[in-house]
Image: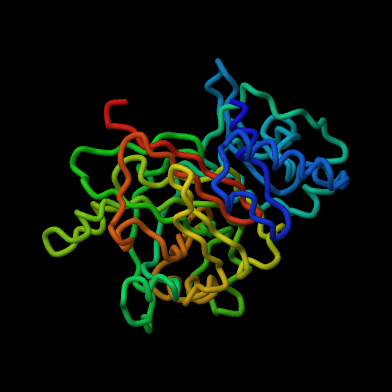
Amino acid sequence: MRAAVSLLRNRFGSARMHAKALPWDQLKINASESIISSGLDEFDIPKGRFIQYMRSGNATKRLGMVSENGSKMIELSSRTCASPDMVQFIQQRYCMSSLLDSIQFMDVDNVSPDLILLPPIHSPGKIIGVSCNYYDSCSERRECVPKEPVFFVKFNTAITGAMDNIRAHQIAKRIDYGCELAVVIGKKCRHVSREAAMSCVFGYMIAQDITARDWNVLLGGQTLLGKSLDTFCPLGPVLVHKCHVPDVDNLWITTIVNGEERQSGNTENMIFKIDYLINRLSQFMTLCPGDIILTGTPAGTGAYRHPSSYLKPGDLVESEIQKLGKLRNKVVNPYA
């Protein structure tokens, strides 16, 4: 599971090492060399980057915190009062500054090769997405910039992990991708103002909003069915606390399919920012700890390429957002 360790690593600076579509093994080497040469010991200290995982041969779910370079970790669920379940941990409302201060007194381990990475959140109460929330995406679709966000939902049975397979279900013929910044709610909120909205956020992670485009247009538009097939929501690899993402409105996003860069965007190009989305949703419903908001995807999705380019068994989808790590999902037939 060495790839699991690589997926936990962060990319630093503005240099985007994947821009030349290098092979996966070479990417790992370059990332490691970049971190080592920095000479900053703090990158080896586990911070507010949370993972859920299991050990090989042990089905017990655990909660841990990893360093920015993915080499060191602390198991919180066995050494603190933290719940091994991420949603329950969020509900415990730990003081993050106190937790980060206390790590100096905890045993720090190397990230083991037998670590089995799980989705950071398994069973959120809600997964709510927003359609066409990037200016370049509207331009690509030749659509007007929306005056209000249009929301959709995905069911939590669609969730899969950062290294898990995406199933190309026989019922879906036009399977598309879309890398998105996922916002995780940290406390219950209703009728929250835009000014207070960001205080309701726990942290951020990467999501791939896999969509069966054919079901989005059949029978008047079956968006729910097209979005919620099993494995159509890869999440991870880590859930990064908001204190480590000070400028969430300026993160680059990429999707690479079979070594070819398909998406290249930045969260600064969101039409409706995170505070507005939380404010808007909370006027209609109670948002709860662990709820996930998918904030939209930049231009470059398969349906709007010329010619269109949908996913098929054997494809490798690599999704990356600055500071949040990387997903690496292979598309397989439904019986694999």
Left or right placement of residue 240 versus residue 140 in this view: right
In the rendered view, tell whether residue 277 sits above or below residue 315.
Answer: below
| Above or below, comparing residue 153 to residue 249 in the picture | above
Q: 286 or 231, which is in the foreground?
A: 231
Q: Is residue 239 left or right of residue 34?
A: left
Q: Nearer the viewer, residue 82 or 149?
A: 149
User: Residue 4: x percent and y percent?
Assistant: 59, 33
Q: Quadrant of residue 2?
A: top right
| Residue at x 20% of width, y 58% of height | 222
Residue 209 visible in image: yes
Q: Residue at x 26, y 51 (%)?
A: 212
Q: In the displayed image of the protein, which residue is found farthest to the top?
A: 57
Residue 58: give x, y in percent of width and height: 56, 18
> What residue do we see at 87% from left, 40% from top?
104
Q: Residue 76 sits in which quadrant?
A: top right
- Tell me, what colour scheme is on the image? rainbow
Left or right: residue 258 compared with residue 1: left
Location of the C terminus by quadrant is top left
Q: Residue furthest left?
A: 219
Residue placed most toward the observer, 172 or 155: 172
> Looking at the rendering, in which quadrant would you find the N terminus?
top right
x and y, in percent, of residue 63 in the image:
63, 36
Left or right: residue 297 compared with residue 333: right
Q: Which x, y percent locates residue 198?
A: 61, 70
Which residue occupies the foreground of this view, 128 or 116? 116
Q: Kindly tell me whether residue 91 is visible in this rendering.
A: no
